[in-house]
């Protein structure tokens, strides 16, 4: 566990509340305070520059964690303990959109999600191959299944877009319902009789 180079307090990495630069770690707020108050104006950053750097750093950390989650899933799913360096290079080229004739960049998040969702389908394809006498094992099978997933990526993107659109529509409906409910409650409060007024108050007015 590292200590913040600015305040010297411990940093809890699990909370995404830290950033690293030039081999040193900082709490996010400490990083902003440090970088925006450097005496040398040449090296001083604006708050916006700091926030952008923090956002990019967190994004890289999340991507790194997801990459490991993907390979961990592959190890478990296929019951293997080794993946070659060339396979990791292939994954990296897929993430960057540089894999052979496959133009799209596929994020590790999307690839992991696809692998999990298509797990049963991939198993059924393997059974069909076995029945045909086509035995594919270990990393060869991983590469075979990866090719299947990439061939379905366009369909996955369409499904994902439709799902996001539907979620936004539902969120908008819920927001409207909450807004209408609040308006109805407000009207009810305005129409509610004042309980503090007794019969004697009205008799005094007659």
Image (tube, rainbow, N blue to C red):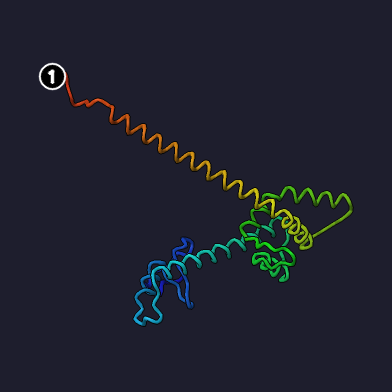
Percent across and percent down for residue 141 are 78, 59
Q: Residue at x 82, y 58 (%)?
A: 136
Spot the residue most to the right. Answer: 133
**Which of the 4 image quadrants contains residue 2?**
bottom left
Q: Residue at x 67, y 51 (%)?
A: 156
Farthest left residue in view: 204
Q: Residue 109: percent from the left, percent from the top?
A: 61, 58
* Badge 1 density bin: few <14, some 14–19, many ≥20, Cα 10 Å: few
Q: Position of residue 126 (x, y in %)?
A: 80, 52
The correct choice, above or below, for 190 with respect to 176 in the image is above
Q: Which structural element holds mark 1?
A: helix
In the image, is 143 to the left or to the right of 56? right
| Closest to the observer, 86 or 35 | 35
Q: Which residue is mark 1?
A: 200
Number of marks present in the image shown: 1
Q: Nearer the viewer, residue 18 or 199?
A: 199
Horizontal arrangement in the rendering, residue 67 relative to residue 197 (left or right): right
Residue 174 placed where, x, y %?
47, 39
Q: Is residue 100 left or right of residue 200?
A: right
Q: Is residue 96 above or below residue 41?
A: above
Quarter placement of the C terminus: top left
Q: Is residue 168 left or right of residue 27?
A: right
């Amino acid at each position: 566990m590292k200590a913040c180079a600015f305040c010297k307090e411990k940093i809890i990495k699990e909370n995404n509340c830290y950033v690293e630069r030039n081999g040193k770690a900082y709490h996010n707020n400490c990083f902003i305070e440090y970088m925006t108050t450097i005496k040398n104006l040449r090296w001083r950053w604006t708050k916006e520059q700091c926030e952008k750097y923090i956002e990019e750093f967190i994004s890289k950390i999340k991507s790194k964690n997801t990459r490991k989650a993907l390979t961990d899933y592959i190890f478990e799913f296929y019951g293997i303990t080794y993946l070659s360096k060339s396979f990791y290079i292939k994954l990296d080229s897929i993430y960057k959109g540089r894999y052979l004739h496959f133009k799209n960049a596929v994020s590790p998040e999307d690839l992991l999600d696809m692998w999990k969702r298509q797990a049963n389908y991939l198993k059924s394809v393997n059974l069909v191959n076995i029945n045909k006498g086509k035995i594919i094992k270990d990393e060869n099978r991983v590469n075979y299944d990866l090719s299947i997933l990439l061939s379905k990526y366009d369909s996955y993107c369409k499904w994902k877009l439709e799902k996001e659109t539907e979620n936004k529509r539902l969120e908008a409906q819920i927001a409207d319902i909450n807004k209408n409910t609040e308006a109805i409650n407000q009207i009810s409060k305005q129409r509610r009789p004042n309980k503090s007024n007794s019969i004697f108050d009205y008799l005094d007015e007659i």
